[in-house]
Amino acid sequence: MDTFEYITALVAVVIGLAIADLATSLHRLLRNRERVRWDWVAPLSALLILAELFNLWWRWHGFSGTTAGQVVPYFLALILIFLAACISLPDEVPAEGVDLARHFDKNRRYFWFVYASYVALLIALISIRDLHNGLTPRDLLSRYYFDYPWLVAAYAMIFVRKRWISGIVMLASLGWLVIGLNLWGRTPDLPL
């Protein structure tokens, strides 16, 4: 087993656990739908994280790190995206029911901090790689013109209480992930 296969086993397990957590939480909500007060933002956060998990899994094929120093930051990113998946939807539906709007409001700061930190770490790693490969800071700004300002907005969302604003930022993020990063047309071997 080479280094890539060895690391990929762990990546697959963590991503699989995150997806399983999202699917299990969704199953519990749907099964107990009569006790669920639905809201659109919490399920949207779960969909966004699911798309991020797929993106990470799909792009992992292009990972070329072989040392602990190259792997550990991505391991941290895995932990962050796992935490974002776990917080997106409630784990249980208690007998008195669950309000998804209240769930998101209660966990909004934690969700945005963890999700923004995940994206910030990935953007930092990709930017460092690109600088190492000869790109200039100006090249990075022209290449990641959406990503750098998005980080500021995502961290600012920690302090924005209006749920609909969170929802709009999530929709924009999902749109960028699917359309801007060409999630549907991208091959899995692009460098991570």
Image: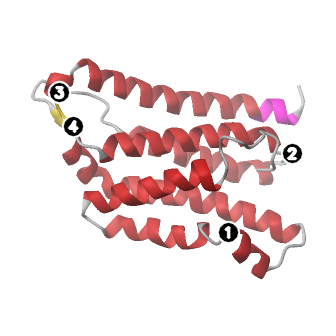
Compared to residue 50, the image places residue 116 above or below, namely below
First reached walking from the N terminus: tag 4 or tag 3: 4
Front position in the image: 139 or 7: 139
On the question of residue 79 being in view, the answer is yes
Q: Nearer the viewer, mark 4 or mark 3?
A: 4
On the question of residue 87 being in view, the answer is no
Marks 3 and 4: in contact by CB < 8 Å?
Answer: no
Alpha carbon separation for disc pair 2 and 3? 45 Å
- The residue range painted magenta reads 3-7
First reached walking from the N terminus: tag 2 or tag 1: 2
For mark 4, give the secondary structure.
loop
Alpha carbon separation for disc pair 4 and 3? 15 Å
- Residue visible at 19% across and 47% down in the picture: 102
Front position in the image: 2 or 166: 166
The residue identified by callout 2 is 66
The residue identified by callout 4 is 38
First reached walking from the N terminus: tag 2 or tag 4: 4
First reached walking from the N terminus: tag 2 or tag 3: 2
The residue identified by callout 3 is 94
Alpha carbon separation for disc pair 2 and 1? 26 Å
Q: Nearer the viewer, mark 3 or mark 1?
A: 1
First reached walking from the N terminus: tag 4 or tag 1: 4
Counting from the top left corner in percent of width and height, residue 139 is at: 78, 76
Counting from the top left corner in percent of width and height, residue 153 is at: 45, 70
The residue identified by callout 1 is 144
Alpha carbon separation for disc pair 3 and 1? 43 Å
